[in-house]
């Protein structure tokens, strides 16, 4: 399941919804929040811009890839767009499987891959400055490690 | 053809979305980029360093040798930073 939305989400509600009916033995999740601090600098807000249409398409491809690689009962990606302040939720990934290894690995794969292939861009506000966040080589490396590993 | 610009490419060109008629001699993404650069200083600045620009044709990541037709949707944007 893919949801691209401005609205907030409830972590408990989302995880409960993926808990199945006794067939799920493991839920793994990742929640990304706006950081209020980057090094020595305070961040007052973050705006997430996206490419409507392509975002949903890429997220659906990433979900299909995860379901292909791991035995998942269910899978959820929620990604928000808009302007958010520190502490606010940006993204949530939940995976449900019979056992923890598949759930944990698929969850890590989903967040690593979406960071490098879903068309979102972050604009950070620091005082009066607004700067587009640059892509990090470490994120590319995190995604690349899944290229060969199951 | 529909052109879309995101993040700082939108700011530098001053445009989020535009419809253009593809010139006859523009048949690849690379040729489109070269043509766009001639359309004004904002475009020139936005496309000065292509190592920090990514492209999508019909919502798929594409390289500069990708062929184009007037029916395509082309997007230009920086490397993605979601999650």
Image (cartoon, coloured by chain):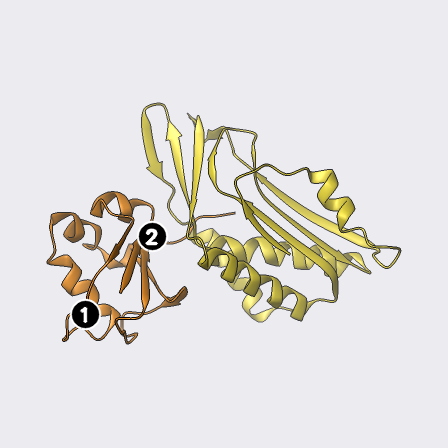
Q: CA distance from mark 2 to mark 1?
A: 19 Å
**Image vertical order of residue A6 relative to residue A73, above or below:** above
**Neighbourhood count class around disc 1 (C-alpha, 10 Å): few under 14, some 14–19, many 20 upward:** some
Q: Quadrant of the C terminus of chain A?
A: bottom right
**Image vertical order of residue A130 relative to residue B55, above or below:** above
Q: What chain is tagged by disc 1?
A: B
Percent across and percent down for residue A99 are 81, 59
Q: Can residue A39 be seen in the rendering of this structure? A: no
Q: Colour of chain B?
A: orange
**Image vertical order of residue A35 relative to residue A48, above or below:** above
Percent across and percent down for residue A20 are 82, 54
Percent across and percent down for residue B80 are 41, 52
**Residue identifier under label 2:** B78
Q: Is residue B4 left or right of residue A88?
A: left
Percent across and percent down for residue A16 are 78, 45
Q: What chain is tagged by disc 2?
A: B
Task: Determine the residue positioned at 33% across, 32% down.
Answer: A130
**Residue identifier under label 1:** B31
Which secondary structure, mark 1? Answer: helix
**Image vertical order of residue A57 relative to residue A135, above or below:** below
Q: Quadrant of the N terminus of chain A?
A: bottom right
Which secondary structure, mark 2? Answer: loop
Q: Quadrant of residue A123?
A: top left
Q: Is residue B66 left or right of residue A56?
A: left
Q: Can residue A93 be seen in the rendering of this structure? A: yes
Task: Determine the residue positioned at 14% across, 58% down.
Answer: B37
Q: Which residue is farthest right?
A: A22
Q: First in sequence, mark 2 or 1: give its number.
A: 1
Q: Colour of chain A?
A: yellow
């Amino acid at each position: 399941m893919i949801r691209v939305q401005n609205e907030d989400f409830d972590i408990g509600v989302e995880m409960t919804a993926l808990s199945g009916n006794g067939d799920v033995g493991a839920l793994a999740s990742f929640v990304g929040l706006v950081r209020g601090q980057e090094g020595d600098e305070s961040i007052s807000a973050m705006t997430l811009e996206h490419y409507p249409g392509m975002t949903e398409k890429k997220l659906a491809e990433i979900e299909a890839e995860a379901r292909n690689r791991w035995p998942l009962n269910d899978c959820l990606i929620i990604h928000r767009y808009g302007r958010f302040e520190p502490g606010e939720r940006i993204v949530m990934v939940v995976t449900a499987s019979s056992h923890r290894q598949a759930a944990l690995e698929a969850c890590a794969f989903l967040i690593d891959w979406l960071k490098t292939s879903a068309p979102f861009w972050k604009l950070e506000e620091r005082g009066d400055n607004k700067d587009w966040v640059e892509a990090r080589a470490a994120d590319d490396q995190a995604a690349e490690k899944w290229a060969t590993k199951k | 053809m529909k052109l879309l610009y995101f993040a700082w490419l939108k700011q530098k060109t001053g445009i989020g979305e535009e419809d253009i008629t593809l010139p006859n001699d523009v048949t690849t993404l690379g040729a489109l980029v070269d043509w766009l650069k001639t359309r004004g200083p904002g475009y020139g600045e936005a496309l000065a360093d292509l190592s920090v620009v990514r492209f999508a044709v019909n919502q798929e990541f594409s390289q500069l040798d990708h062929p184009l037709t007037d029916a395509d949707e082309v997007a230009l944007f920086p490397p993605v930073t979601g999650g």
